[in-house]
Amino acid sequence: MDKIGERLQEGLGALIKVSQTKRIALYLEIRVDLMLEWGS
């Protein structure tokens, strides 16, 4: 049981990290798009 619990926690941690990096990437993409629009 303990090993399964540890695996689940590791999996959840990885998912949270992925969703955070995706959010940051999206935010940066939006910022770049806005900067390009304002720059032109």
Image: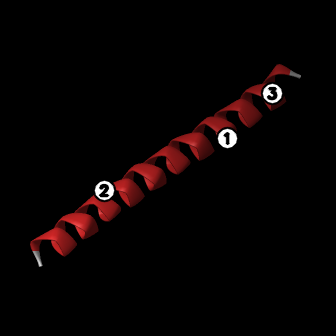
Disc 2 or 3, which lies upstream in sequence? 2
Residue situated in front as seen by the camera: 15 or 3: 3
SS of the residue at dot 2? Answer: helix
Q: Quadrant of residue 5?
A: bottom left
Q: Residue at x 10, y 72 (%)?
A: 2
The label shown at residue 13 is 2
SS of the residue at dot 1? Answer: helix
Q: Position of residue 24 (x, y in %)?
A: 52, 41
SS of the residue at dot 3? Answer: helix
Residue situated in front as seen by the camera: 39 or 3: 3
For the image, the number of numbered tags is: 3
Badge 2: residue crowd in 10 Å (few <14, some 14–19, many ≥20):
few
The answer to whether mark 1 and mark 2 are in CB contact below 8 A is no
In the image as oriented, which residue stretches furthest toward the right? 40
Q: Position of residue 1 (x, y in %)?
A: 12, 79
Left or right: where does residue 27 sit relative to residue 14? Answer: right
Q: Residue at x 82, y 20 (%)?
A: 39
Left or right: where does residue 5 sit relative to residue 30? Answer: left
**Amino acid residing under circle 1:** Ile
**Amino acid residing under circle 3:** Leu
- Position of residue 35 relative to residue 17, above or below, is above
Q: Position of residue 8 (x, y in %)?
A: 26, 69
Disc 1 or 2, which lies upstream in sequence? 2
The CA span between labels 2 and 3 is 35 Å
**Amino acid residing under circle 2:** Gly
Q: Quadrant of the C terminus?
A: top right
